[in-house]
Amino acid sequence: MSDKSEQDEKGFMQSLDGIRPLKHDKIDVYQNTPRKKHKVRPHRDFTDPVSELEAITHNIPETRQDSWFHHGVQKKLQRKIKAGQFTIDAMLDLHGHRQHEAIQELEAFMQTAINTRSRLVIIIHGKGFNSESEAVLRPLVQHWLSEQSMVLAFCPAQPKDGGSGASYVYLKSQKS
């Protein structure tokens, strides 16, 4: 070895003074990542709409949630639902109903839709133009839908089906 390379090596080793060697060179990339916790909603029966109506109408969150998709619904399916590319199996029109009546109609309709194995239904709740302050039925319906275990998704309908005055609702498939 030449004198110059020995000096370089000696200088390099001096510059490393106080540095400890690694025990291993592998990194655990999953070490500190928290796991997502998914909410598990219990299956609800559509039996008594009257007893829960007061709790539902007073506990509606103030943030608007026009669309909701269960975490298992694939992006491609979400796009198809939003685009209205599925056949509508059933329709419910809630125009002119009061909140209490609307919930009763909605529960009866959804029970029928589930019993007939419907996949995509449309609920017409109106845009709220005739309400005294703001839309009443739309947030009520959307909140109620978000609480149901059989609902996989809901979103505003296409303009041809009622636009923001109606919602597409995609239901779980019923196995025989």
Image: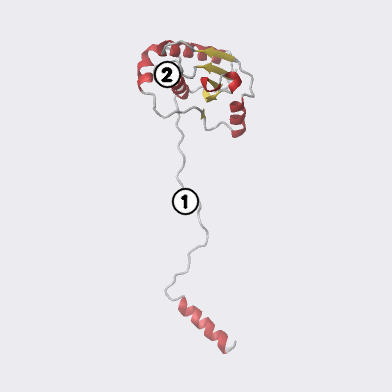
For marks 2 and 1 on the same chain, the one whose residue lies earlier in the sequence: 1
x, y percentage for residue 82?
58, 27
Query: Looking at the image, which residue is at 46% across and 28% down?
Result: 65
> Which numbered tag is attached to residue 107?
none
Residue 86: x, y in percent? 63, 22
Give 113 or 168, whichever is nearer the viewer.
Answer: 168
Which percent across, then down, holds residue 81?
59, 26
- Residue 16 vertical placement versus 57 (above, below): below
Instruction: Please state the horizontal and vertical placement of residue 138, each as a whole percent of the image.
Output: 46, 20
Is 13 or 70 nearer to us in this picture? 70
Image quarter in which the N terminus is found: bottom right
**Element on which disc 1 rests:** loop
| Amino acid type at image mark 2 | Val
Question: What residue would you read off at disc 2?
Answer: 136
* Colouring scheme, one of rainbow, by chain, secondary structure, one colour: secondary structure
Q: Nearer the viewer, residue 40 or 74?
A: 74
- The residue drawn where x is 64% and y is 24% is 85
Name the side, left or right, on which 50 lies relative to 23: left
- Specify the quadrant that holds the C terminus: top right
Q: Going by the image, does 131 lie left or right of 70?
A: left
The outermost residue toward the bottom is 3
The residue tagged with tag 2: helix, strand or loop? loop
Q: Residues within 10 Å of mark 2 (few under 14, many from 20)?
A: some
Q: Amino acid at mark 1?
A: Gln
Q: Which residue is mark 1?
A: 31
**Residue at position x 47%, y 69% from top?**
21
What's the distance in space between the residues labelled 2 and 1, CA to CA? 47 Å
* The quarter of the displayed image where residue 75 is located: top right
Residue 172 vertical position relative to residue 105 in the rendered view, above or below: below
Foreground mark, 2 or 1, reads 2
Residue 167 seen in render: yes
